[in-house]
Amino acid sequence: MLLEVKDIVKRFYGVTVLNKVNLGFAGGEVHALVGENGAGKSTLMKIIGGIYHADEGSVLVDKTAVKISNALDAAKLGISIVHQEYNLVPDMTVLENVMLGKEMTGRLKAIDKESSKAYVEEIARKDGIKVNLDKYAGDLSSAEAKVAEILRACTNSMRLLILDEPTAALDDDDVASLFSLIRNLKARNIGVIYISHRLDEVFHICDKVSVLKDGKHVGTWETGAIDRDFLVKAMVGREITAVFPPRPTTKREGTKKILCIEHLSDASHFQNVSLHVGQSEILGIGGMSGHGQRELLRALFGAGKITSGTISIEGKPVVVKHPADALKYGMAFLSDDRRNEGLAQTQSVERNIAYPSLNRYHRNGMVRTKVQHALVGDLIDRLGIKLASERQIVQNLSGGNQQRVVLAKWLPLNPRILLLDEPTLGVDVGAKVEIYKILRDLVSQGISIIMVTSDMLELLNISDRIIVFYEGSVSAEYPGEVATEEIIMAAASGKPMAIGGMV
Amino acid sequence: MKPFADTIKTFVRDLRNPKRHSSKIIWVLLVVLLIPIIIVIPEFVRPANIANVLIQMAPLGMVAIGQTYVILGGGIDLSVGSQISLISLIASTLMTDSPLNIIAVAALCLVCGVLFGALNGFILKLFPMPPIIVTLCTGYFFQGIAFALHKTSGGYIPVALKQVLTANSGFFSVPFGLYVLLFAIFAYVLYRTRFGRYVYALGGNADVLEKSGIRIDRIKIKTYMVSGLLCAIVGIYLAARLRSGSARYGDEYTLLSITATVVGGTSMAGGLGGLTGTFAGTILISMLTNVLNNIAFRYNLQSTYYKDIITGILLISAMYFYRNRK
């Protein structure tokens, strides 16, 4: 075994995050680590990488116990982590980033760019890595940035590479080239720990898979010996038969259009977009990320600039220049960036829920706390937000609960249209089920939803109608019941297929 | 003609979308401003006046070098003015006519400057707080000590030191020569050495630098030490020039050094910019100061207020202009 962890225990503020975890990772093996959010995967990797320290247990490299107290120690042992989040200095070139901390110097301590470049190019060639070394890191696409980070790891005479959700921001072509890179590393007897939520990838690229649940090691299997359903069951601990609530059976034809937009364009992200959403309808917007759907949603909420086109609500034309306008017309918005745009992280749940509707229950500018308290308590019950107290700080809640808090803050305004950007991003399976139920519930009460999502299953199973974006325009539209993954992918790459006379 | 037109087109496009580490704009601004200045005040380009501008820009230029290091590293040093003042008073309080004493006191001043910077850095390491608050407070602290040493300007600086530090002939002068020398050294360190690279990384993404195994606190402390050292040099120079020390000598250099740095294209967030831009920013400020003094002299006005107004406008415009740059 290249690396083993023995009886690792880690607690945060008295909460046990890892409970006696034992795992072994071998060289030349791609080992997947899966589990729901909060299962302890990232914590375990951070212990191996020297960012956290285990309360109990030991880490062994080549069967010798080692002490890893920082990233440098890990690097010396040949362990490199490519974190999920962006980890490059944006205003430095790829070469400078790769060599950061180990610059080669020549006369008068000057950095020797030529030797560094030759050295890095040699390594890149050996591992089959293609990246422009002179580009600034801030100008790289997410795929190129990942590759640059892996290249940096390769220059550390790496023996074990930890990839934390490497494909979260990559499209299919990039994933394919990442996989061929992983195969190269494997052939060089480098061990890879692959953390991912995408189970298809686990079966595609990994030799072994280990499951963590609630900080415990559930088991390790050869990927060839098990199937997807088995793995999901191991992760969730129960079988999830109905992640997605059924669509209502009643016909919606002839229901009135709530929101209509016509020929809407902004400066650079979307052009000439026309669409509508009917009452009690969920309109799903799909497509590759970065094709303008996100910007359209923001523009509708007044958080982006519209250059031409019209928006009308229930037939009346409206002008939305600021989120305050959007709220006035009954729109509410869930950002994909919950951390920065959805919630005031350091404030309590009660305050967060109360912010948008504060002007509904004040007396001469004084907040009527009793009214607020009752209202918030009611919403917490209604949406099933799990809390120790409504005074709890939002920061410490799970993703699923945070998302429910964001939903709760809009409901007192009685919105007619909900604009959702990635409504279940960073939310685990259990909470997803709950959120989908809430959305269906809201729709049955007459609310309309426009949902931008990159989660294909969500798009296919939640939407009543699906619109696919390609290069800033609507590429195709399908009823939710007939759309399939293939059809959506074709439309998302600009080659929509016709099905049943619909495009 | 065509390739020439294309070059101009690219140049203009680059100006509208400034690239990383580009200080092109500020140089263009300098040239553009120079034209009306020469037309309105032809005296500006007289050799004697140019030599004068070079002397005037030297102390600001030196402080701005340190300020650039600190801002590039993601910090800011609001205590530079007070450090300069305090050093000027340490020098004027301790100096006598003996050459040995002059050298010893000057050396002591340099050591004090480095220590002042180190103090800023260590406070930031021990008590992680916004550097804008920490250095504002240490600035008051330094200035308080300075006032305790001397309520008004005072002390004694031997005339010999003044003669050495202010010597000039034609375009050459000791202060400007010293500035050029220091600029060359610190530009080399910033652009060519590992330390310089780490200063950029510290401001650009300190997390990445730390995970690359670098002790970021040490880099940060060193940037403040560089700033302190340069303040000490300026403190000695100002004391020698005026043959006294004062708790107010350094006041204007805090905002001016930040302005020179930011106008030169260094990002307030750190990690982006550099000394070439700061050099141009220093020239711009010195040029405008000189022009204002000329105008004030011609029309018999009090010029200092106008200078403050212009500095404020410059800083705000520069920050607004660079706001969207990645």
Image (spheres, helix red, strand yellow):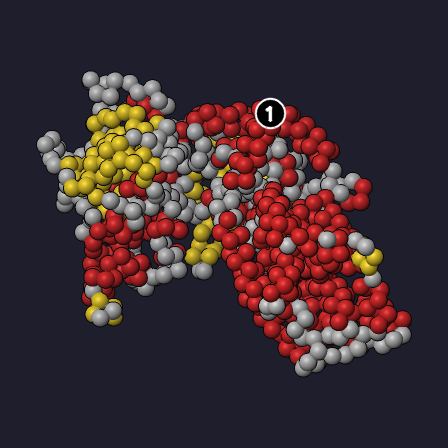
Q: Residue A464 placed where, x, y %?
A: 20, 33
Which residue in the structure is indicated by mark 1?
B1
Mark 1 lies on a secondary structure that is loop
Q: Residue A202 placed where, x, y %?
A: 44, 31
Q: Residue B217 placed where, x, y %?
A: 63, 57
In the image, residue B176 sits, relative to residue A204, either above or below, namely: below
Between A3 and A304, the one nearer to me in the picture: A304
Between B161 and A432, the one nearer to me in the picture: B161
Q: Residue A449 placed where, x, y %?
A: 22, 40
Residue A255 found in image quarter: top left
Residue flagged by tag 1: what amino acid is it? Met
Residue depicted at x 69% and y 32%: A117
In the image, residue B5 sits, relative to residue B253, either above or below, namely: above
The C terminus of chain A is located in which quarter? top left
Residue depicted at x 43% and y 29%: A171
Task: Say few, some or many: other residues with alpha carbon within 10 Å of mark 1 (under 14 / 14 to 19 / 20 or more).
Answer: few
Which chain is indicated by disc 1?
B
